[in-house]
Amino acid sequence: MTNARLDAVPNVDIEEGRFKYVLIKIKDKENASALEKTIVRGYKDCQWHSDIYERCSAHLQAMGLETEVLGGGKIEHDPAAKKIKIFGESTGYGKADHEETKKILLTQYSDYTIDVAE
């Protein structure tokens, strides 16, 4: 089963370098029985995990989607070396499931080495 609204949202939106990230669960407000989707968002210009969530949630809610933060952490993304490192946690949201984050990142970066550190 697919959902056009969920399918329209990219699984991953991250930058290069070192930055905070959040794991966000989204679902369609109009269709309570619809599937859920978990996405990864991370931006260098956001000082706090809540800044990332606020940037994303407003846009997603305008699309008719419900959002829920599942936790946060940090990412180091080195496109030249094709490496990503996932680590850390959010003081406000708690630690994201880094293994789930890795699984989602691999949908876009399948040719990368992705390491998870505590």
Image (cartoon, rainbow, N blue to C red):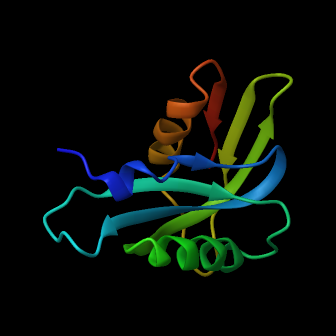
- Pick out the residue farthest to the top: 111
Horizontal side of 72 relative to 9 (left or right) equals right
Position of residue 16 measured from the top left corner of the image (x, y, whole percent): 82, 43
Give the camera-side residue of 57 and 85.
57
Q: Looking at the image, how many numbered discs can be counted on the residues?
A: 0
Position of residue 9 measured from the top left corner of the image (x, y, whole percent): 48, 53
Q: Residue at x 58, y 47 (%)?
A: 12
Q: Residue at x 76, y 23 (%)?
A: 82
Q: Residue at x 82, y 74 (%)?
A: 47
Give the camera-side residue of 15 and 113.
15
Give the camera-side residue of 117 and 79.
79
Image quarter in which the N terminus is found: top left
Horizontal side of 111 relative to 81 (left or right) equals left
Position of residue 41 measured from the top left corner of the image (x, y, whole percent): 62, 57
Against 34, is 12 above or below? above
* Residue 93 visible (yes or no): no
Horizontal side of 82 relative to 59 (left or right) equals right
Against 12, is 107 above or below? above
Give the camera-side residue of 5 and 71.
5
Horizontal side of 26 relative to 2 (left or right) equals right
* Residue 85 visible (yes or no): yes
